[in-house]
Amino acid sequence: MDLCAFYVNGHRYGIPVLAVEEIVRPLPITPVPGSDRRLAGIINLRGVSATVVDLRRCLAPQENADSFASGHGGGPISIADLDAVQRIGVSDFNCRLILMEDHDHLCEAAREQEIGVFCEPVALLVDQVERVHRLRVSHRHPPPANLRHNFIAGIYELEDGFLSEISVLNLIDDILAAVRVGNEPGV
Amino acid sequence: MDDDDFVGEFIAESLASLAMVERHLLRLESASTIDAEIVDEIFRAVHSMKGGSGFLGLDQVVTLSHHAEALMDEIRKGVMAMSAAVADSLLAAVDGLRGLLENQSVDVEGLCQRLSRHLPSKKEVVDISQAMVDGHLLIIEASSEQLREAPDCKDGVLAGLAKIGEVISSTLTEEEMQTGTQHVTVRLSSPLPPEIVASLYHLEPEQVVPSTENVTAAPASSQQIAQPSTQVVTAPAALEAKEIDVIERGAGKNNTSANGREPQSAVLRAAPPSPSPAKSASASLPAMATPQPGESSVRVSTRFLDELLEATGNMVMARNQMLSRYQFQDDVSFAVLSRCITDVHKNVVQQRMQSIGSLFDRFRRPVRDLANKLGKEVEFQTDGGDIELDRTIIEAFADPLNHMVRNAVDHAIEAPEERVANGKSRVGRLILRAYHQSGEVIVEIEDDGAGIDPQRIVAKAIEKGVVSVERAARLRQREMVHLIFEPGFSTKDQSTDVSGRGVGMDVVKTNVERIGGAIEIHTNLGVGTIFAFRLPLTQTVVSSSLISAIVIEVAGQRFVLPQSAVNEIIQVDPQDGKDRIKQLDGEDVYQLREKVLAIVHLEDCLSLQRTFRHPVSGELLPDRRGRIADRRQQESPEKAQAFAHQRKRLDRRRQRQTLIVLEFRRALFGILVDSVVGVEEVVVRSTPQLLSQVPGFCGHTVLGDGSVVMMLDVAGIVAQRGLRLQDLPEHRVEARSALKTAQQMITFENAPGEFFAIPLMMITLIEHIQGDDIHRVGSREFYQLKDQTIPLLRLEHHLDVGSFNDQETYHLILPARVPKPVGILAGGNLRIADFSESFDGNNDTRSGVVGTAYQSGQVFTLLDLYALVEKAMPEVFAGLTQQRLNGSTRMLLAEDNKFFAKLVSSYLQLPGLELTVVEDGQQAWDLLHRDRKMFDIVVSDIEMPRMNGFELVQRIKSDPALRHMPVLALTSLADEDSRRRGLKAGFDEYAVKIDKQDLLSMVHRFVSDIQAAALPSVEQGVR
C-alpha cells in the first residue's frame, strides 16, 4: 500500500495515495462561522467546492483538545484565527491542501483495496507534505490503546520513526457526529 | 432502439398524453360550449395511443383506446354531445388505460361496453381485434382504374368492396376513383383470403397482401364511405407510416426484422398527400405533427441533468470571474460566448424546473370525483400555475397538497343545500394558488366552506387527549386552530375512504417542514379557510441556478443575501443626532417610518467577534465594547450581565453602518452589517454536508473575484435569534373576499337624508373635530391638525347638495394620495359599509361625483375625492392635469369594478385621449385581437373575471403585432411585491388605481413615448 506522508504538529501521518486527488498550495479559505472548529472552511478549486478539514486542529495535543472537543460553536473565532485564515496560503510556505477523491471518482484499484473516502470533496490542511512510502499492510500495527484519536487506522514503523495512518472516513464521521450532537435542540 | 426502450418510451408518452386527455375532458365537461380544438386534441391523443399500442401488440390497450376513440369521434363530428355520463365513461376509460399501462388488471370489456352504450345504436364499433380473429386484414394496392373495372364494382368501388368485407380505409374517395388512374391503397377486413380477393377483382396476387399490423383505424362505417368527401388518407395510415419510419431508422442500425413491413411503408409514403382538407384529414395531419416516441424527446436521468447543471453553473461562475478580471466589452466573440453560456444555463435549469400548474391540475380530477361522490358541487380554480419550482419540491408537495385538497372537499365545503341555507352560492369554491412573496413561494388552498371552529377543535383535542384541559383554557384562537396539526388529531370520528385514513394533518405538517416550509391557517367561521404553505425561495429554486444577491461585509468577512429577501438598505450613522437606533427592553430597535423593527447584529448571529476598523490605521480590531458574552460560557452571572449590558449599548466608535431591512413572511426586521459591497448575479451551490448543520446559511457561491462566500438564510437568522415576528392579521380571508366582491365605503350624512360614500382606500384619516376648532380666514376654513394647517372643503360649496346645519362636531376626512393636505368636512352618521357593485355611474355627470348607489333603502352619492379636491383647490394638483397630450392616442382600459372603471376613466378624460372601457381581460383581448391597430396603449386591472390582467398581458406580449404596445397595470395594492410580480408578468408599468397623480404621470410618459415613436413612421407614410 502506498501512503502519502505529511507532517501535522510535528508528527508524521499518512493516507493512501489512491485516495488523494491532488496536492495544492493553500488557497484562500472561506471560514464558515459556527461550524465545527476542525473545519477550516470552504475552498473553490477549479469550480469544485471542497470542505477543508484542518488536521492541525484535529490532531491538536491533549491540553488544547478541550477548546474544540465540545463540538461546534465553541465560541467566536478570535482575531488570531482571523489572522490565521489570512495567513494561510500567503506566508506559511510549507502548508499544503490535500484534496481527497470523492466517492464517485475513486479509481477501481482503490475500491478493490477498500479505501474509504467521503461522498463529497474534502481537502486536508497539513503543515508539510513529505513523500510517498510503499508499505506492506501486513506491517501495520494496530494503534496503541492509549492513542486518543479513534481515526488512526494503524501505525507503521519506519527507519526514521513512526507513521500513523489516518482513516479520513472515520475522522469525518467523528466530525459529523459532533456536529449533529451540537445541533440537537436545547444544546 | 430495442423493443424494451420502445415500449418504455411508449408508456411514458402515453401516460403523459393520458394526463392531458384527462385535463381536457374535465375542461370540456365544465365548459358550456365544446371547444373543437380540445376535442381534436383528445381524439388525436387517444388515436396515437391506439396506433402505438397496436404496433407494440398491446391488445387490451388497443381495444380500449379504440372504443374511446370511436366515442370521441362522434363527439368530434358533433353527432354526440359531451354529457356528464359520457365524460364519466371516458374518464373511466382513461383510468383503465392508465391501469393497463401500469400493468394492472383492468376490466377492459366492461369499460368498452360502457363506452359503446353511448354510441348511437346503429353504429356498432367495429372491433378490430375481433376482425383479426374472424377474418383477414388486407391491403389492396391498385390503380383506381383497375378497381373501377372490377366486375363487382359497377355500383362504386367502395360499395363493391364492402360486399366482401369492411373497408377500413382508402387513400382515395369514391369520386376520385371514378376518374383517372391514380394509385390507391385500400385496407379491407374480409373473411376471404388475399388470393381470392385478388382474383375477384382481377388483380395480381401481390397487389393484395395481408396486413402485418395488429390493428388499425377508425371504423369506416358504410355511412362514412357513402359521404364521399370525408374519406381521405385516414389517420392510421399516416400514423403508421410515421412509426414505421421510426423503426426503420432503428433497423438501419441493428437490422431488426422490419423487412416484412418495408414494402408496405414505402407504398404508404409514396401515396399522394391528402388532396382535400376534409374532416378526417384534420385528424390525421396533426397526428403526424404530434411528437412520436423517440423522435423529439429524449429521457435522461436526473443525475445526468444534475451534473450538467453543476457544470453549466460553473461555466457561468467562471464567465463572471473572467468578466471581472478582463475587459471584454469590445470582444464580440466573447459576447457571443457569454450569451451562449447564459442560454445554456437557463435551459438546463429549466429542465429541472416544473410549473406548479402541473401539480395543481392533478387535483382537478380528484376534486370532481370526490365532489360527485359526496353530492357536493365544487368549482375548482387555480391561480399562479405558471410559477416554477424545482421538480423535487413539486413532487414532495404532491402528498400534502393531495391531503389538504381532499380535506377541503370532504370537510370544509358544505353540501349544496346547507350552503344555500347559509346564504352562500350552491357551488363551493376551491382555489389552489401560488405566488411569490418576499423571497418565498406561497402555495395556498382556499375554500369558501364552513371554516374551522376553534371551539370544536379544542373540544376534540381534549377528547383525544392531544391537549390537557388546563392548557386548552390558556390557548388563543390561533393556537386552537393549530391543534389540528398535533399528532393523533382527526376531526371525523369515522375515517372515510375520502380523507382521514389516520394519517392526519401532522403528517402534512412534517412533510412540508421536511422541505423547509411552514404552514399557516387563516380561517373564518362560515366564510372559508386558507391554508398557506410557505417555502423559502432557496428551497424552491434549483441548486446551481442563478439568483441576484447582495454582497455584504461584516467582521471582515463577506456574505451574500438573496436579493429577494431584502426590502430596503439604510445607512445608519451613530454620530448623527437623527440616529434612530434605540434601546427597547435591552434590545436594539430601529424606527423605520411608523414601524419599530428588531435589529439583529449579524456578528452575534454568526458567533463572530464584533470588530471595528481603526479610524487611523485602518486595521481590523476586535470591538471590546461589544464583546460577546457567550451564553454558553458564562463564568459569573454578574460579569455576564455586565457584558450583556455593555453589548447592547451601541458602540459609538463605529463608523457608519448599514442596516439591511429584510422581509420575512410579510414582517420586517433589520440586520446590521458593516457595509454593502455590491450586488451580483450568483450561482447558488448547496452547502457541503459537513457544514450543512451550521445554522444561518442556505448555501454558498463563488463571486466574480473567485472567492467563496456563504449565503445567509433569512429564515435561519430568524430562528437562531428567536425572533417572534408579528403574524399577518387573522381577517385575511374576509379582507380578500371583500376586495373581490364588494367595495368598502365610508358613508356619512350631511343634510338630513343626503348620504355620501367614499371608498375607504381613498382615505388616510378620519378625525372627530369640534366646530369651534375650525378657523375661518375670509371665505376659507382651516383646521389645525398637529403641526399642519389643513384647508377645509365643504361639499355644499362645490356640489349641488344641501348644506348641513351648523353642528357642534364634524368629521374631518383626509383623502389619501393628494400632494398637499386637504380636509373634507363631513356630517354625522359616519359608517363603514360594504357596497356591492350595483351602482349607477352613467346618469351623473357632475364633476366630483362618480355615481349613485342604492343600499339598504338609501341612496348614496359616491364621491370622487380627487375631482372634488381638484375642483375646489386647483392648486393642489397644479401642473398635472393641464398637461396636454399632443395628437390622438387610443387607450383601452380593462377594469371589472364599475366604480373604479368610472373613477379611472374620469381621471383619463384628457384632451387627445380616446378611451375605450371594457369589463374584463377577455373583452379586451377580443378587441385587440380583432384589430391589432385599434389601440395604442392598454391599461388593465389585475383581478378580473374570465381573463385576469396577468393573462391578458402575457397574451399581448406574446403576439408579435401587439408586443410593443405599452401595457400598464392598475391595482389597488401598492406594495412592492405586487409591483414586481406585475412587471415580471410583462406589464410595462404599475400604478395604484386611486393615485391620480401617479397614474397620470405614468400615462403621460408612455403616451409621449408612443407619439415620439409614431412620428417618423407617419412621415414615412406620407412620403
Image: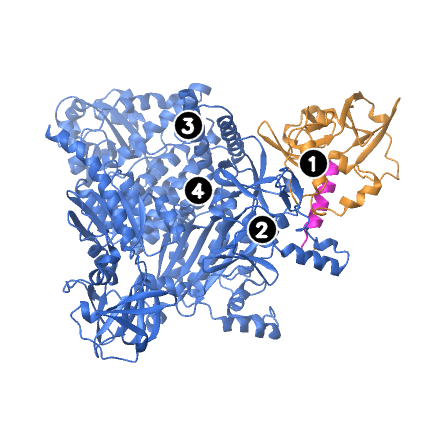
Chain colours: A orange, B blue
Q: Main secondary structure of the magenta part?
A: helix
Say if B464 sits above or below A23 in the image. below
| Residue located beneath label 2 in the image | B717
Identified by mark 1, the residue type is: Asp
Whether pointer 3 and pointer 2 mark residues with C-beta atoms closer than 8 Å, the reply is no
Whether pointer 4 and pointer 1 mark residues with C-beta atoms closer than 8 Å, the reply is no
Whether pointer 1 and pointer 3 mark residues with C-beta atoms closer than 8 Å, the reply is no
Identified by mark 4, the residue type is: Gln
In magenta, the rendered stretch is A169-185
Structural distance between the alpha carbons of marks 4 and 1: 46 Å
Identified by mark 3, the residue type is: Arg
Say if B724 sits above or below B383 in the image. below
Label 3 or label 2, whichever comes before in sequence order: 3
Label 2 or label 4, whichever comes before in sequence order: 4
Q: Position of residue B724 (x, y in %)?
A: 56, 60
Circle number at residue B354: 4
Circle number at residue A83: 1
Quadrant assignment for the C terminus of chain B? top left
| Residue located beneath label 3 in the image | B339
Say if B650 sits above or below B480 in the image. above
Identify which residue, B244 or B731, lies in the foreground: B731
